[in-house]
Image (cartoon, rainbow, N blue to C red):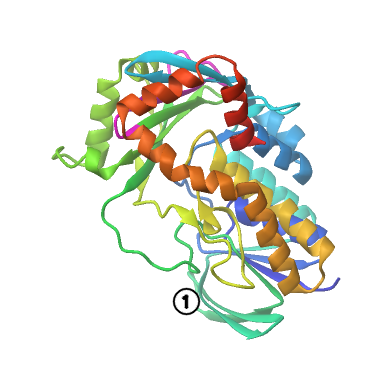
Amino acid sequence: MNLTAIVVGAGPAGLSASIGLARAGFSVRVLEQRKEWQKRVCGSFLSAEASQHLQWLGLLKSAREKGCFVPEAFLYQNDKLKATVPCQVKNFSGLAIPRKELEELLILEAKKINVEIEWGMCVNKIQKISDSYWKVEAVSTSEKKKFVLESEVVVAAEGRFSLFKKEVHETTGWFGWNAEFKTLNPIPGELSLHFFPGGYFGTLTFKNGSSNVSGLIHSNFKKDFKGEWNEFLTHLIECQSALKNKLRGALENSTWKGVGPLPFGQAVDLSPGIFAVGDAAGVCDPFMGEGIARALSSGSMLYHAFEKYKESMLAWKEYVRRWKKRYWVRQKIGSPLRAVIRNQTLTTAMLTLIRRPNKIQKQLISLLHS
């Protein structure tokens, strides 16, 4: 197969997709609007499912060397430990690795198999020329020069606010945010979730002792607070003694970054012929590393779709089928889970059901991470 593919976006989803397509015989160009790597609003926990995808990509050993194992997650509510959930499924365990180090591994692997990554290239238009050809218009952000490229395959991997999604102007809804701290008594591989009415905080400690603090909160929970978001998040930490104790004396390595309202829902088949991957395919609830696992799955899914069908439209239909088979049910339970988080009584009931190893806990872990 001597075909070309353009991947829009050089995050984990786009890089994984580029590796899968290159292995399928494509000549791949990745266009990324950022001029260099930048921090984004995201968690850093790699679930057991993410580890499986890293194995397919040939990067699991390197990720384990750079990161550390996450054996379990501690779930808190009202400062009390409510449940402990194992992070291992079959022979795969959870991992903690900084996002930059993970993406560096993906970039090295992509370049090793001749994927061309172009930084500072902003794609502003994609037009279908025929059933098997696309025209991509991009602008170099440094030279302000316009480029017109053609390709048999186009992959949308530019995130939750993808060019290929219908633009929605919302001012209220769920917001995600994160910052990195250097804690005084770090426990590498420690993962905890702290639930409160309206959202949750999550903390993950890396091998180097730094901790990523991220979370999700509904904007209605903030409406009576007059300060800025960073002041509000600091205030919330002060109100969560278990979380406050973890971060006592910690130095803030990075300022709070936020994004939202988050456009939850699936969009994998909204643009026929365009292969949407990662958050461009569907923004999921950021519980326990779900988003990064989906992003890393794109390589193997695309590879197997083109292994089965050489014609791009048939491969697209096969890719959509595989994506929905794996993620459709998880996508549907997102809204009920967010409703549970907004209600303290329902959150208590949920944590009570999974507080000990039992059939419900195993089914939930299997549903989210297998």
Q: Residue 300: give x, y in percent of width and height.
A: 74, 51
- Residue at the right extreme, as displayed: 1
The residue depicted at 57 percent of the width and 46 percent of the height is 329
135, above or below 263, in the image:
below
Q: Quadrant of the N terminus?
A: bottom right
The quarter of the picture where residue 134 lies is: bottom right
Q: Residue 56: give x, y in percent of width and height.
A: 78, 44
Q: Quadrant of the C terminus?
A: top right
Q: Amino acid at mark 1?
A: Lys
- Residue at the bottom extreme, as displayed: 129
The residue depicted at 26 percent of the width and 55 percent of the height is 171
The quarter of the picture where residue 105 lies is: top right
| Secondary structure type for disc 1 | loop
Q: Residues within 10 Å of mark 1 (few under 14, many from 20)?
A: few
The residue that disc 1 covers is 144
Q: Can residue 47 be found in the magenta stretch? A: no
The residue depicted at 59 percent of the width and 32 percent of the height is 97
263, above or below 61, in the image:
below
Closest to the observer, 155 or 270: 270
From the viewer's perspective, tell me whether residue 160 is left or right of residue 175. Answer: right
99, above or below 146, in the image:
above
Q: Magenta residues, as a range?
A: 182-199
